[in-house]
């Protein structure tokens, strides 16, 4: 009986020492992480790594077809995004037409390949010209999204709205809010679609 009690006592002490050592290591790691953590602004976080690239160029392909091409004046690697200066995104349709998106600044999420344009954003497609202050390209859904107000113009046409989605492949356009269309073509007066 004594040996049995002594055996359990030694086992308990050994197990307690192991748990105690693990707990102390955990506390030490938390303390190091807390002392190393520095509060930085969003702009500082974006440029934290310090890696800069002049004139970056990225191409997305499916087979031998180019789906989109992204270039910029320069880029800085942030924590989870690349901050782009003067980015230009060219989206290629299946028919070979090109939609060109230009912005003052943008963010590229390298893993998802999503691009977010900010500032003054210009989009040109055929004779259409769209202006907005915010535009996103969602690579997974293959969609251009203009979440805020925009103005699009073409010959004799003006379209305004908010929350527009355009599928790159099908070229289907959906405008969800505040839609306003002005057609000043005299040939269309009195016509029904």
Image (tube, rainbow, N blue to C red):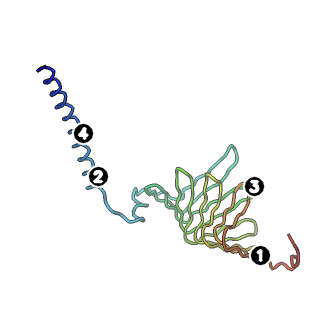
Give the x, y percent position of residue 131. Answer: 64, 72
Task: Write down the residue under mark 2.
Answer: 33
Tell me the SS state at disc 1.
Answer: strand
Task: Write down the residue under mark 1.
Answer: 157
Q: Residue at x 14, y 24 (%)?
A: 5
Tell me the SS state at disc 3.
Answer: loop
In the image, 11 versus 139, the foreground residue is: 11
User: In the shown orientation, is residue 9 left or right of residue 105?
Assistant: left
Q: CA distance from mark 2 to mark 3?
A: 52 Å
* Outermost left residue: 2
Q: CA distance from mark 3 to mark 1?
A: 24 Å
In the image, 3 versus 119, the foreground residue is: 3
Residue count near mark 4 (Cα–Cα under 10 Å), binned few <14, some 14–19, many ≥20: few
Camera-near label (4 vs 3) is 4
Mark positioned earlier in the residue sequence (3 or 1): 3
Give residue 72's quadrant in the image.
Answer: bottom right
Residue count near mark 2 (Cα–Cα under 10 Å), binned few <14, some 14–19, many ≥20: few
Q: CA distance from mark 1 to mark 2?
A: 58 Å
Tell me the SS state at disc 4.
Answer: helix
Q: Residue at x 70, y 48 (%)?
A: 65
Task: Write down the residue under mark 3.
Answer: 96
Q: CA distance from mark 4 to mark 1?
A: 70 Å
The answer to the question of whether label 1 and label 2 lie on touching residues, with beta carbons closer than 8 A, is no
Give residue 170's quadrant in the image.
Answer: bottom right
User: In the shown orientation, is residue 122 left or right of residue 46?
Assistant: right
Residue count near mark 1 (Cα–Cα under 10 Å), binned few <14, some 14–19, many ≥20: few
Mark positioned earlier in the residue sequence (1 or 2): 2
């Amino acid at each position: 009986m004594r040996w049995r009690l002594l055996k359990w006592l030694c086992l308990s002490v050994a197990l307690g020492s192991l748990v105690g050592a693990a707990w102390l290591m955990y506390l030490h790691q938390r303390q190091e992480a807390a002392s190393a953590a520095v509060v930085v602004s969003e702009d500082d976080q974006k440029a934290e790594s310090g890696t800069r690239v002049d004139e970056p160029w990225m191409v997305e392909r499916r087979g031998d077809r180019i789906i989109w091409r992204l270039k910029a004046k320069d880029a800085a690697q942030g924590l989870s995004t690349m901050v782009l200066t003067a980015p230009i995104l060219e989206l290629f349709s299946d028919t070979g037409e090109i939609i060109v998106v230009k912005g003052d600044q943008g963010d590229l999420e390298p893993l998802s390949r999503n691009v977010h344009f900010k500032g003054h954003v210009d989009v040109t497609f055929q004779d259409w010209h769209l202006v907005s202050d915010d535009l996103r390209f969602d690579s997974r859904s293959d969609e251009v999204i203009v979440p805020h107000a925009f103005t699009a113009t073409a010959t004799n046409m003006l379209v305004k709205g908010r929350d527009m989605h355009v599928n790159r492949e099908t070229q289907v356009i959906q405008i969800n809010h505040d839609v306003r269309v002005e057609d000043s073509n005299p040939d269309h007066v009195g016509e029904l679609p």
